[in-house]
Amino acid sequence: MAKKGMIEKNRRRQKLAKQFAGKRAALKAITQNKDLPLDERLNATLKLAQMPRNSAEVRFRLRCEVSGRPRAVYRKFKMSRIALRELGNKGLVPGLVKSSW
């Protein structure tokens, strides 16, 4: 099980990223638009730099919903390989069948 503080920090980052997503996208579109004047693009870049760092989507990490493990997480199930195997063997994951031959 992951530390509860790390899980909470990740949740806060995810919440901030959702909150600032529209504003970040608008500023990023301005900075990448080559038709606009340079000073306007520079101002948008400075505003983007003043936003909280944790509001960027790349700052939060995909974690297992069951254990909080940060590595080897399947996006489809939102679970780590270990939790997926344990719950799959018990038959608790719909659509997952343990293969045997």
Image (cartoon, rainbow, N blue to C red):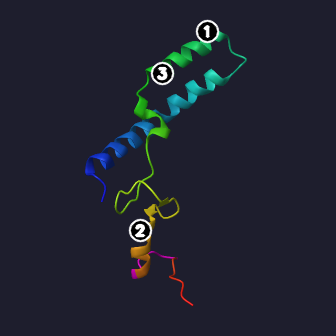
Circle 2: residue type:
Ile
Residue 2, given in percent of the width and then of the height, sits at: 31, 55
Dominant SS in magenta: loop
The magenta stretch spans which residues? 90-95
Residue at which label 2 appears: 82
Residue name at image x 41 percent, y 77 percent: 92
Residue name at image x 44 percent, y 47 percent: 61
Is 50 or 6 nearer to us in this picture? Answer: 6
Residue at which label 3 appears: 49
Residue 66, given in percent of the width and then of the height, sits at: 36, 63
Q: Quadrant of residue 14?
A: top left
Query: Compared with residue 26, is residue 6 higher up or lower down, i.e. above or below?
Result: below
In terms of sequence position, does the residue under pointer 3 or pointer 2 come before the other? Answer: 3
Residue at which label 1 appears: 39
Residue 63's tag is none
Query: Compared with residue 16, is residue 69 higher up or lower down, i.e. above or below?
Result: below
Q: Is mark 3 on a helix, strand or loop?
A: helix
Name the quadrant of the N terminus.
bottom left
Locate residue 68 relative to residue 49 in the image: left or right.
left
